[in-house]
Image: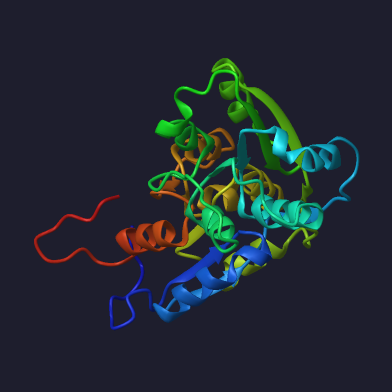
Amino acid sequence: MSGCSQQNQPLTDCTLWLTRPAAQVQQLQLQLEQLGARVRCLPMLLIEPVPLTGASKLRILDLDRYDLVFYVSSNAAVLGLEAIFSYWPQYPSHLLNFAVGPGTAAVLESFGLDVSYPTERMSSEAMLALPQLQAIQGKKALIVRGIGGREILAESLQERGVSVDYAELYQRKRPEYDATMLQQLFQQEKPQAVVVSSAESLDNLRHFCATATLWQALPLFVSSERLAGHAHQLGNGRAIVMAGASDNAIISGLLASLTPAPAGHTQRQ
């Protein structure tokens, strides 16, 4: 796959669509623009905090009764720590903290907290493979997340003998765009890459494609094999799988696919 010029800025002449929520995209956009890319931010998820009430509030108040705390996104980390420190002057020191990836971990580390996280893949499956989670029978875990979502983390922990609760602090919503917006943007300037890092964003992107032809034409760059499979189920079988959803993984994946291979090397498709 190609279509971009390799100059001093290797992504010059590349048009990229980023679909992350607005609060999570600024740094990635800046780095890509410094590499010469034309970046259009098209958030395919809105993140809305929900009032801290009911079971979620009780679980934050009972935080010291848990052994393990899991933060499944940077939104979960930001909102979770905000809720925790509104009730806890000091974070309980005995807790073992886990994050889904380096971006989420960085939020916890900015508060001086120790956290374990997978470095090669950002996913619940990769987090579950951490050595600290292989002998945890009888522990109590709190998963900080949005309303709904995948259940694989809780189910796998329960299979390992862990008691699991949720603190659900936000909801994900589909944004409101004009039905023909993506078609118009695509006709004005076709993107070389459309970066997607969640199944819900992928679903919403498909929703806003006015035609199957447009959807099938989008050059998707996704953060996991699971998302590539989901894209294929939705009718787009051309998704390129990056090494993960971190800024570095996205940038590396784009550079590998959109810039000419060095002489003597075959470009990976």
Q: Image point 69% across, 55% down: which residue? A: 90
163 versus 60 height, above or below: above
Camera-side residue of 133 and 145: 133
Q: Image point 53% across, 72% down: which residue? A: 27
Report how many numbered discs are placed on residues in the image: 0
Quarter of the rendering occupied by the N terminus: bottom left
> Whole-percent x and y of residue 62?
78, 37
Q: Residue furthest left?
A: 264
Q: Residue furthest bottom?
A: 8
Q: Image point 65% across, 53% down: which residue? A: 77
Q: Is residue 187 left or right of residue 265?
A: right
Camera-side residue of 113 and 266: 113
> Whole-percent x and y of residue 101?
49, 49
Q: Is residue 148 visible?
A: no
Q: Image point 17% across, 55% down: which residue? A: 266
21 versus 80 height, above or below: below
> Whole-percent x and y of residue 105?
53, 53
Q: Is residue 145 visible?
A: yes
